[in-house]
Amino acid sequence: MGSQTDHKIPVIDFTDKNLKPGSDSWVSACKLIRYGLEEYGCFEAVYDKVPTELHTSIFSAAKELFDLPIETKEQKTSDRPGANYVGQDPFVPLYESLGLDNPTSFEAAESFTKFMWPAGNDTFREIVRSFSKPAAELYGTAIRIVFDSYGLGRLYGSHIESAFYRLRFFKYSVPKPNESNVGLPNHTDKTFVTILHQHQVEGLQIRTKDDQYIDVKAKPSSFLCIAGEGLMAWSNDRIRPCEHRVIIKENKGRYSLGFYTLVNGVIHVPEEMIDEEYPLAYKPIDYLDFLLHFFTNDIVRYAACPIKAFAGV
Ligand SMILES: O=C(O)CCC(=O)C(=O)O
Ligand SMILES: [Fe+2]
């Protein structure tokens, strides 16, 4: 059996001032990102637009949010599928999650904040927005590189127009004696892309093709960009959706963040993605309809690959 050292998730330096379309840095980033997504379903982004103070304050905000009464958190609903509260679930007893759509927008952040704190909490609202803006910028650059790496830069603009973001906060409690330390079992995300960000307490692991788990280090300037099932479908199965899980090894509560990209529109497999090795594997996917089915239709939800169960040809 191999060891974790046999594997290395590619690291892309987004702080590189030369990382501009057409530059040598861009061309090498295209190769590395494509390799990361096809081999591991992910890559690590080193990114400095979330300063340390903001990193610290978004995690304090996460704690403040989860410290609210369960009744308040449970009432959070959403027009769009999958943005409600998850917690007190016997299948994932350590896990709680809560999030909001369009976190960069004043109105959306204010409405979520007012829901949680009826008397208002401007600090929370502004921390959410200040974190989400650079996270969205990171996504924009990263996905432009992904599209370029397949020679599909022309589709970048329309993708960004139909994309929307969801910020999700995660909390894991410490397992009780005799309780399993699995915070979240192995899964793939139903997003297009998820950007994961950890704080102090590690626990995120990604699964490799040869069935090993690699620990992902928590660093304030590190963001793990993982492919969801949406990106797999767009790439006609060239990109692997990242399998990942969370294991709680430390005797401390764990907080983490997921910045999701979802699509308000239809995902079509671009023609260039189809050839003999990769025959067309998906019908056009109305993405919100897919999410709705995933959350309401057990056949889709419990399928080995939900997006294929929904849209496989
Ligand atoms: O907590 C993490 O780092 C990952 C969370 C996650 O994978 C999820 O909620 O889908
Ligand atoms: Fe996940």
Image (tube, rainbow, N blue to C red):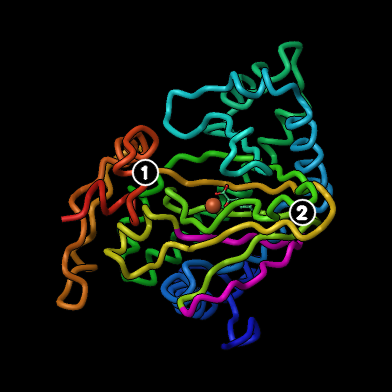
How packed mark 1 is, by other alpha carbons closer than 10 Å (few <14, some 14-19, many 20 or more), is: some
Question: Given this view, does label 1 or label 2 mark the residue nearer the observer?
Answer: 1
Instruction: Identify the residue under disc 1.
Output: 301
Give the residue drawn at x 56%, y 55%. Answer: 185
Q: Position of residue 117 (x, y in %)?
A: 73, 17
What range is drawn magenta here? Answer: 210-227
Between residue 215 and residue 302, name the one nearer to us: 302
Above/below status of 244 relative to 110: below
Residue 140 lies in the magenta stretch: no
Q: Position of residue 14 (x, y in %)?
A: 62, 66
Q: Position of residue 26 (x, y in %)?
A: 50, 74
Considering the image in quadrants, where does the C terminus appear? bottom left
Give the residue drawn at x 57%, y 25%. Answer: 108
Q: Secondary structure at mark 1?
A: helix
How packed mark 2 is, by other alpha carbons closer than 10 Å (few <14, some 14-19, many 20 or more), is: some
Type of amino acid at the residue the image marks with label 1: Arg
The single residue placed furthest to the top in the displayed view is 119
Q: Is residue 218 found left or right of 53 in the rendered image?
A: left
Q: Is residue 155 found left or right of 145 in the rendered image?
A: left
Type of amino acid at the residue the image marks with label 2: His
Give the residue drawn at x 69%, y 62%. Answer: 222
Instruction: Identify the residue under disc 2.
Output: 199
